[in-house]
Image (spheres, rainbow, N blue to C red):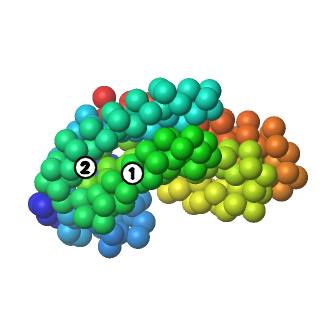
Amino acid sequence: MQQYVVRPHDTLYLISKEFDVPLVQLIRANPQITNPNLIYEGQTINIPNLLTVPDQIGSLETNAVNIIDDIYRSDWASANSRVNEIRTTMNTLVPILQEAEVPNDVIFELNATIRTLEQNVTQRRAYPAISQANRITQILADVLDYFNVIVPPDLLRLAYFARQLIVNVEQNDWAEALQNYRRAMAVWQRIRPLLGNYAQDVAVVDQVFVDLLGSINSRDYRTAIDGASRILELNERLTANFEQMYT
């Protein structure tokens, strides 16, 4: 890990561009900075050395999300095929995760979740399988914290909580839906400051959260699911925003 001494007029964004390190990773490497928008001349900044995101991570995420869609369509054969792909992909990914110094407990948890997913798909237990497939995406966000990413891993976490919220509403578990709403909101509050140039999109997401809370409090099944689904749609737009920042 390199170190850099802040010069006049520096910002974390400019430093991230200079060293070609995504802003979110630069912030993560400097926990001593409590306000990412406020750094001082002469301050020492850590510049992380991170590996490029391996293709296997994208494959795991795609298959996990597609398994959820398969289960909603009752296409268990396809879900089972994707589980096999996930297992094979994970075997090739483990050495890369170790090289990137991803903690062993995170790797263990990802493997354990894949095994549990396989059991639930084999037994055709819909909601447990959906939750485990979704859980894979959340753990992948923790994994991505150790790689050189452009899109903040928190966007994966935001999508995870939105999907869990949908499951909660479908099971009429409004208390847990509210908890996942609060978790999603906490993640969104971390993402918001990084999107200063996209105020219009930020305002749209803010309003969706306001409306979603109202639908949860009133236990409006359809509107709550629509609100959580809207967050998933907007997640794709936010992803494009971050990609645009670095192109």
Image: 150 above or below 182 = above
Q: CA separation, marks 2 and 1?
A: 25 Å
Please indicate, yes or no, whether residue 175 appears anywhere in the rendered image: yes
Where is mark 2, residue-wise?
A: 147
Tell me which amino acid carries mark 1. Answer: Arg
Instruction: Judge from the rendering whether residue 83 lies leftward or rightward of residue 97; answer left or right.
Output: right
Split into 4 quadrants, where in the image is the C terminus?
top left
Q: Can you give x and y, in whole percent of width and height, for residue 220 in the image?
A: 85, 45
Q: Residue at x 33, y 33 (%)?
A: 85
- Disc 2 and disc 1 in contact, CB within 8 angstroms: no
Above or below, 180 relative to 51: below
Q: Residue at x 82, y 43 (%)?
A: 221
Taking depth in this image into account, of 188 and 172 the one nearest to the observer is 172
Query: Tag 2's secondary structure?
Result: strand
Q: 140 above or below 88? A: below
Residue at disc 1, secondary structure: helix
x then y, percent, for residue 197? 48, 39
Look at label 2 and name its amino acid: Phe
Label 1 packing within 10 angstroms: few (<14), some (14-19), many (20+) = some
Indicate the quadrant containing the N terminus: top left, top right, bottom left or bottom right. Answer: bottom left
State the image coordinates of residue 87 (x, y, percent, origin top left): 31, 41
Q: Which residue is mark 1?
A: 115
In this picture, residue 152 sits left or right of residue 69 = left
Find the residue positioned furthest to the right: 218
Name the image quarter holding residue 105.
Answer: bottom left
Packing grade of label 2 (10 A; few <14, some 14-19, many >=20) is many
Residue 52 visible somewhere in the drawing: no
Q: Residue at x 71, y 56 (%)?
A: 177
